[in-house]
Image (spheres, rainbow, N blue to C red):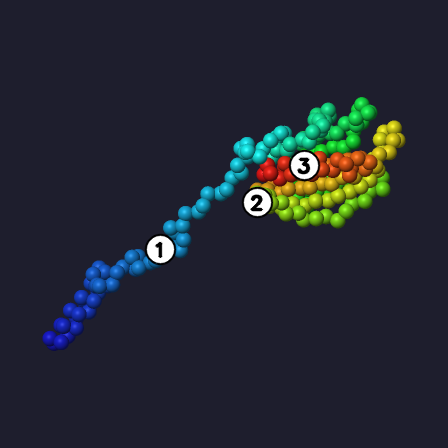
């Protein structure tokens, strides 16, 4: 009988321990580990810094990108065009030009696609168009994520039937935020070799501006 009483007491004590949680084991809630990553604080999302910098000289295009026109290049008189367009007037013929330098921007294309698109647009009104192989360029500026260049030649036909042989190239630069700035540059073939360095100078000013 005494043994039975002791057994009942032990069972009762065990029930109390289970119900009241007065044993040595911690409650289940206290044993649950913290969720993985609960203490992680995400880094803020990077945002563009489009403020003017020391290399931003000449003409502001947008998104913090500028370019410096070469000597003798003037703003296009046609203000309906998007972006910034500069022209090289013919020295001996008022109203005629030897070349143009047109800077445009987009977020709808990547660098390669925008360069190809602009070459298609420019060459659409030409005859005998020849488009060179595209080149994935690598400017030294680390703020440029991607770069793509295409060259082309063709004969521009005026409304009066006049024909002018042209040679040009498009270079598109894509920044870290996938915004693309493209330079569309061309010269009459007869002056290309003599003045192409002026186009290169303006392109270099764009690269420095990023």
**Of the pair 116 and 9, the residue shown nearer to us:** 116
Callout 2: few (<14), some (14-19), or many (20+) C-alpha neighbours within 10 Å? few
Residue 158 position by quadrant: top right
115 shown above or below 35: above
Circle on res. 201: 3
User: In the current view of this chain or complex, which residue is farthest to the left?
Assistant: 2
Query: Left or right of 22: which side holds 126?
Result: right
Crowding at dot 1, Cα within 10 Å, few <14 / some 14-19 / many 20+, comes out as few
Q: Residue at (35%, 55%) from the top-left corner?
A: 34
Q: Residue at x 20, y 61 (%)?
A: 22
Disc 1 vs disc 2: which is toward the camera?
Answer: 2
On the image, the x and y values in percent for residue 52 come to 55, 32
* Residue 178 visible in rendering: no
Judged from the image, the secondary structure of the residue bearing numbered disc 2 is loop
Q: Are marks 3 and 1 in contact (CB under 8 Å)?
A: no
Question: Does residue 14 show up?
Answer: yes
In the figure, residue 24 lies in which quadrant? bottom left
Residue 175: name its quadrant. Answer: top right
Q: Image quadrant for the N terminus?
A: bottom left
Element carrying mark 3: helix
Q: Secondary structure at mark 1?
A: loop
For marks 3 and 2, the one nearer the N-term is 2
Q: In the image, what residue occupies the spot 63% across and 29% down?
A: 59
Relative height, residue 25 to residue 166 (above, below): below
Label 1 and label 2: CA atoms lie apart by 41 Å
- Estimate the spatial distance between the alpha carbons at disc 3 and disc 2, rounded to whole Å: 19 Å
Most distant residue in the top direction = 94
Which numbered dot is residue 34? Answer: 1
Residue under label 2: 142
Give the x, y percent position of residue 169: 74, 41
Q: Earlier in the sequence, mark 3 or mark 1?
A: 1
Mark 1 or mark 2, earlier in chain: 1
């Amino acid at each position: 009988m005494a043994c039975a009483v002791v057994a009942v007491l032990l069972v009762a004590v065990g029930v109390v321990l289970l119900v009241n949680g007065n044993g040595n084991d911690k409650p289940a809630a206290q044993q649950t580990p913290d969720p993985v990553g609960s203490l992680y604080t995400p880094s803020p999302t990077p945002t563009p810094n489009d403020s003017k910098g020391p290399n931003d000289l000449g003409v502001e295009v947008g998104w913090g990108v500028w370019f410096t026109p070469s000597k003798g290049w003037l703003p296009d008189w046609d203000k309906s065009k998007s972006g910034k367009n500069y022209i090289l007037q013919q020295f001996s013929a008022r109203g005629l030009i030897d070349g143009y330098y047109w800077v445009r921007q987009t977020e709808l294309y990547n660098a390669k696609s925008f360069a190809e698109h602009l070459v298609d647009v420019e060459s659409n009104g030409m005859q005998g168009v020849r488009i060179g192989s595209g080149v994935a360029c690598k400017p030294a500026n680390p703020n440029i994520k991607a770069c793509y260049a295409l060259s082309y030649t063709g004969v521009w036909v005026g409304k009066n039937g006049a024909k002018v042989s042209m040679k040009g190239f498009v270079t598109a630069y894509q920044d870290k935020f996938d915004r693309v700035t493209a330079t569309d540059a061309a010269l009459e073939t007869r002056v290309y070799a003599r003045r192409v360095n002026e186009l290169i100078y303006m392109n270099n000013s764009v690269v420095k501006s990023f």
